[in-house]
Image: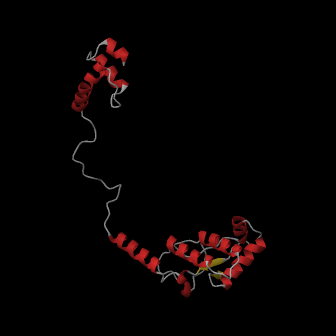
Amino acid sequence: MPKYEIPTKFQLTSNYDLIDKWKLLGLIQADPFLKPIDRQVAYFLLNHCNTTTGLCYPSHELLAKEAHCCLRSAKSATRRLCQRKWFTLLQRGRPGRANDYWPAFDRVEHDKDVKKYKERKGANMMLKKVQRSAPQTINETLYKTKEGKEEELLRMVSFVKRGQRILSISDDMVEEMFRRQLITEGEFKNW
């Protein structure tokens, strides 16, 4: 995390979402003055963007590796992206540190799709949802009682006697039936 303060111009008003990245990437891809390598590097810069802070700071070496280009091309691409105002260079990296970039999210703030998504997301956050881990009231017992197991065992005896195989009848149940002498030895062996 950078140790410096983000300039007031770039203060975070709200968290950025995937839709902000997606719309900004679409605008960058449509810029006719950018080279194909610039568009590739822009994708990877946005991919490294932290949606909470809005900052991205991958090194030029990492961008070159991801975009499958040389280091010089990655540096030129980031320079052109900053010149076209798609990214703002907040702090130039010292040796061993990467540059800090701020994507131009202000270009997509007023997009109707972005507004609609954020309004809907805000409305959904206001709804009280039941958490999946919250305790639920269940009107039936979860565990079978001893009497319930007995009843189930007795119900299944007729199926075993007829030789009908049902998924709910386990081998343990058939052994228990034989042990209690509910079925004959021949019926047990046929199972």
Number of numbered discs present?
0
- Colour convention: secondary structure
Front residue (pair 30, 111): 30
Q: Which residue is found at the position 70% from the left and 67% from the top?
A: 67
Residue at x 24%, y 42% (from the top left corner): 141
Towards the viewer: 98 or 75:
75
Q: Is residue 153 left or right of residue 10?
A: left
185 vs 106, left or right, is left
Q: Considering only vertical position in the picture, is 94 above or below 181?
A: below
Quadrant in which residue 134 is drawn: bottom left
Closer to the camera in the image, 137 or 80: 80
**Position above or below: 155 against 9:** above
- Which quarter of the figure is the C terminus placed in? top left
Position in image of residue 113 (x %, y %):
46, 77
For residue 38, what is the image quadrant? bottom right
Q: Is residue 32 above or below residue 146?
A: below
> What x and y, as percent, mark residue 116?
42, 77
Q: Quadrant of residue 128?
A: bottom left
Is residue 89 visible from the viewing direction of this image? yes
* Whether residue 93 is visible: no
Q: Nearer the viewer, residue 99 or 108?
A: 108
Q: Position of residue 155 (x, y in %)?
A: 24, 27
Residue 144: image x %, image y %?
Answer: 26, 36
At 51% from the left and 70% from the top, the residue drawn is 18
Which part of the image, by quadrant, shows the N terminus?
bottom right
